[in-house]
Image (tube, rainbow, N blue to C red):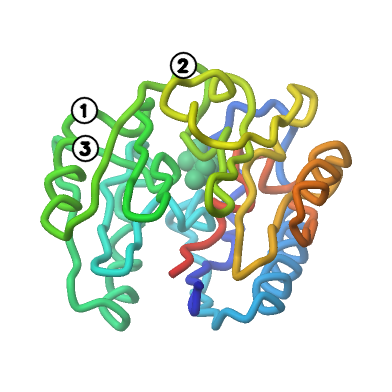
């Protein structure tokens, strides 16, 4: 059960955000409208929203998920792997201090993006990516171990972040695409397979019984609904242009 989410308004500078998507420049006004609709969807799932003002210094700062990993017993402030994103975590830490007594940090030379971390119960799966390095994982492992959580890492071959291609829903259910479909690490899960043509839709979030996913991916939506879930689809096309999805836009705890 999540009670809270932290989100940040898109910055006008988002048009200069990092991307490999080749989908053109995001439309700032449309992004703001989509962000508001995303917040409404979250609100309808019963969470309290902490909405931070836009931070123009950081074009990618709307993607708050990468700045922290939140668990029941502690918050871990990350050291984001992209140079242009380093520093986003400072303001997030100030907010987290309002909610958490125990705050830990990933420190240089370690780097880790929250998008590379998927929590399943008391276990964390961490992707080793262009953003998250071995030292980041080592520090992360050491931190979570202190609090009684476990952790395992896996190298990524194609995806930006681990959660670009896999989402945990509940119990044994995963939504997966691409390189994660056949992964040994996920062999004991029940998989909702996202076809290559809809791979973007594998980035979805389960919030208090509802799956929030991107709009426009009918096969995946149907597959998730057929697995017994209530689905809310939101248009996040402008964030997709920056390689971001529905998980990246919030910190949920
Ligand atoms: C970036 O490259 O950092 C942003 N343009 C997108 C971040 C997406 N975040 C996520 O997958 N958790």
- The quadrant holding residue 28 is bottom right
Q: Is residue 96 left or right of residue 223?
A: left
Question: Could you classify mark 3 by the number of other residues whose Cα lies within 10 Å: few (under 14), some (14-19), or many (20 or more)?
Answer: many
- The first of marks 1 and 2 along the sequence is 1
- Whether ligand 1 has any atom under 8 Å from the Cβ at mark 1 is answered as no
Q: Is residue 13 left or right of residue 192?
A: left
Rounded to the nearest angstrom, the CA distance separating label 1 from label 3 is 5 Å
Residue 134 shows which numbered tag? 1
Q: Residue at x 70, y 26 (%)?
A: 22
- The first of marks 3 and 2 along the sequence is 3
Rounded to the nearest angstrom, the CA distance separating label 3 from label 2 is 18 Å
Q: Is residue 36 left or right of residue 135?
A: right
Q: Residue at x 25, y 69 (%)?
A: 73
In the rendered image, residue 114, in percent from the top left (x then y), is placed at 39, 48
Give the residue pinned by disc 3: 136
Q: Residue at x 79, y 39 (%)?
A: 220
């Amino acid at each position: 059960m999540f009670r809270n989410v932290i989100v940040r308004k898109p910055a006008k500078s988002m048009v200069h955000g990092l991307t490999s998507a080749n989908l053109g420049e995001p439309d700032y006004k449309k992004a703001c409208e989509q962000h508001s609709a995303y917040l409404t969807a979250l609100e309808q799932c019963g969470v309290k929203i902490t909405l931070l003002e836009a931070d123009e210094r950081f074009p990618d700062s709307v993607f708050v998920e990468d700045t922290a990993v939140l668990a029941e017993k502690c918050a871990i402030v990350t050291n984001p792997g992209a140079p242009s994103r380093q520093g986003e975590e400072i303001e997030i830490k100030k907010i987290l201090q309002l909610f958490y007594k125990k705050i830990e940090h990933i420190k240089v030379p370690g780097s880790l993006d929250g998008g590379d971390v998927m929590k399943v119960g008391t276990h964390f799966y961490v992707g080793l990516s262009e953003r998250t390095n071995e030292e980041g994982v080592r520090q992360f492992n050491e931190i979570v171990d202190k609090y009684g959580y476990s952790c395992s890492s896996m190298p990524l071959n194609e995806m930006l972040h681990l959660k670009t291609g896999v989402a945990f829903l509940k119990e044994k259910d995963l939504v997966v695409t691409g390189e994660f479909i056949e992964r040994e690490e996920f062999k004991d899960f029940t998989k909702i397979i996202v076809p290559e043509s809809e791979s973007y839709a594998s980035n979805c979030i389960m919030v208090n019984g509802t799956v929030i996913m991107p709009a426009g991916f009918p096969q995946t939506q149907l597959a998730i609904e057929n697995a017994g879930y209530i689905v809310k689809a939101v248009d996040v096309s402008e964030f997709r242009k920056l390689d971001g999805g529905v998980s990246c836009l919030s910190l949920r705890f």
